[in-house]
């Protein structure tokens, strides 16, 4: 069952990205960039204007990848996250815009150890983007944003001991900067 869930998630992500590329050929207003939240967290962002000052936004990010351990155990982890939302822009002046909009997201991560213990983490969330965009030039912009969200997380382990959590939050730790190119 876990393999089917992972395959389904990867298929949805692939089809969404492929679909975004097909739609991108139809519209001259596209943006691609990197979104940084801290020195260790980043996402790739793709935005396509579907009408004036309204964009579909796609974010794909590596949630985590790493190894920790000591002389007796090693813990390997990897994860992937995807968000699809709508971003509305309201001009404040010629170069500055207020951005806002809903952004649902999903992430999955897999953790395993050298003693054959494994667990899956699934997270669903609904966030609301709030931020500002500054147009550096016609082709480049920088934005700063936060996404307060309601999230549900489920951790399933191979010993049938599952955990869940529900969180709602607005944190200054969640502030991100995006550097983007318009084409």
Image (tube, rainbow, N blue to C red):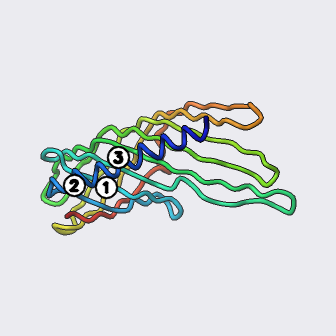
Up-down relation of residue 27 to residue 5 (above or below): below
Q: Verify CB contact (< 8 Å) between mark 1 and mark 3.
A: no
| Residue drawn at (64%, 36%) of the image | 155
Reading the image, the residue beneath label 1 is: 46
Task: Report the Cα–Cα distance between label 1 and label 2.
Answer: 10 Å
Image position, residue 163 (x, y; %): 67, 32
Image position, residue 114 (x, y; %): 79, 55
Indicate the quadrant where residue 94 lies.
Answer: bottom left
In the picture, measured across the screen, residue 1 lies left or right of residue 176, that is right
Tell me the crowding category of disc 1: few under 14, some 14 to 19, or many 20 or more residues within 10 angstroms, Cα based. many
Reading the image, the residue beneath label 2 is: 24
Mark earlier in primary sequence (2, 3): 3
Task: Report the Cα–Cα distance between label 1 and label 3.
Answer: 11 Å
Secondary element at image label 3: helix
Image position, residue 31 (x, y; %): 25, 59
Reading the image, the residue beneath label 3 is: 16
In the picture, measured across the screen, residue 40 lies left or right of residue 94, that is right
């Amino acid at each position: 069952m876990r393999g089917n869930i992972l395959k389904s998630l990867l298929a949805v992500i692939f089809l969404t990205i492929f679909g975004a590329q097909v739609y991108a050929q139809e519209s001259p207003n596209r943006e691609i960039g990197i979104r940084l939240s801290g020195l260790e967290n980043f996402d790739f962002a793709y935005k396509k204007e579907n009408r004036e000052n309204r964009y579909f936004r796609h974010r794909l990010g590596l949630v985590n990848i790493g190894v920790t351990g000591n002389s007796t155990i090693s813990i390997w982890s990897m994860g992937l996250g995807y968000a699809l939302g709508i971003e509305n822009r309201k001009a404040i002046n010629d170069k500055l815009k207020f951005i806002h909009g809903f952004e649902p997201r999903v992430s999955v991560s897999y953790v395993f150890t050298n003693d054959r213990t494994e667990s899956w983490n699934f997270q669903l969330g609904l966030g609301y983007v709030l931020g500002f965009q500054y147009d550096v030039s016609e082709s480049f912009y920088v934005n700063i944003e936060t996404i307060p969200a309601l999230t549900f997380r489920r951790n399933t382990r191979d010993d049938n001991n599952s955990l869940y959590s529900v969180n709602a939050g607005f944190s200054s730790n969640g502030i991100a900067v995006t550097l983007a190119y318009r084409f």
